[in-house]
Image (spheres, rainbow, N blue to C red):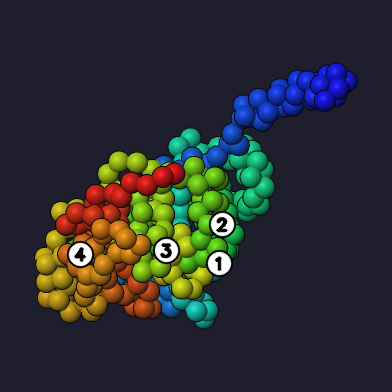
Amino acid sequence: MTRRDFALLLGAAAVARPRVLAQAQAPARPAIKTQSLNHVAFFASDVQRTADWYQRTFGMPVQFRQETGGRVAVLRLGPGPEFIAVYPANGAKPGFKHMGFGVQNFSRPAIDQALAAHGVKAEWSLRKAPGGDVEELLVRDPDGLVVQVQDVKYAGGGGRLGDAWPQPWTMPPQDARPPVAARAVNHVTFGSASKERAERFYRDLFALPLLSWDYRPAEPSKILGVGSGSPRQFIAPGQGRNVGVSHYCLGIEGFSREQVTRALGERGIQYRPSTGSSGCCGANVVYSPDETVFGLTDPDGFSVQLTDVDYCAGTGPLGTVCIPGNR
């Protein structure tokens, strides 16, 4: 190597090093930091029938609101503000509509900045409501699954944050004590055309941390936490043979499979008992039949899973011991 070549090499290194340092110190893109799995929403063939089923099964207080497409039922989970929303299908096929994420200090400028940084398009709209019009945001993931993003106080009502209801909630009849008291949405499970792409989308845009691993007969899947603490809430992206939501799960405080199945049976509510199955990939994980109740279906046949409020698809008698893994 000549002196000239050596000098050129040193010059190139001097230029390259600041560039590498600048890349290493580049600020992370802003994210929409999610604090709660605020709600799930469905299209139903008969809104009143589905609302009655949820009240009879879970004792959820209900509010009705009028929209362009018809009457929407909002059923509160536990003390709220989390809820289940039932929209009229109006002749279309009933099924999953969207899931809702709650964020602290809901701010359109900050959210728009994060969306732009990730190259994600979204739809803002203004919903007319008696308690005051509500600005609402819908985002689609790479597979077209809709995510509504609102303040953590959002309760499906009116007012700036959607937390105002001018009238009191309608409670189920006193003589119809519900067999199961649901506390919160525990998780939503959905299939994707690309599991890795779906995981990356939710982890990047919504800053969802890895909560646990769910070992299936295929390859392990990541459980992404929504918020922190108890009750646990998460999404399970990329699980299932078909693209779209396969089921959602409600968390029950003091969950006992024996008590829940007995209560459902006494009310004549149909369900399919779950059975245990082994994990895969060399994992010492066994799904216990005592962890959950599968196969409960609403009047339109959509699957609802029941489990403990701290379930994370992990180990332990109720699946509440999360399985650590590399991020």
Circle 2 sits in a helix, a strand or a loop, which is it?
helix
Q: Name the residue: 64% across, 38% down.
A: 113
Sequence-wise, the earlier of marks 3 and 1 is 1
Using the rendered view, name the quadrant where residue 255 is placed.
Answer: bottom left
Q: Name the residue: 21% across, 62% down.
A: 291
Q: x%, y% of residue 25? A: 62, 26
Q: Name the residue: 86% across, 22% down.
A: 2
The residue nearer to you, when weighing 169 against 28, is: 28
**Crowd rating for badge 3 (residues with CA inside 10 Å; few <14, some 14–19, many 20+):** few
Amino acid of disc 3:
Glu
Q: Which residue position is annotated with label 1?
A: 193
> What's the CA distance linking mark 4 and mark 1?
29 Å
Q: Nearer the viewer, mark 3 or mark 2?
A: 3
Q: Which residue position is annotated with label 3?
A: 219
Using the rendered view, name the quadrant where residue 318 is placed.
Answer: bottom left
Circle 3 sits in a helix, a strand or a loop, which is it?
loop
Amino acid of disc 4:
Ser
Circle 1 sits in a helix, a strand or a loop, which is it?
loop
Tell me how many marks there are: 4
Q: Quadrant of the N terminus?
A: top right
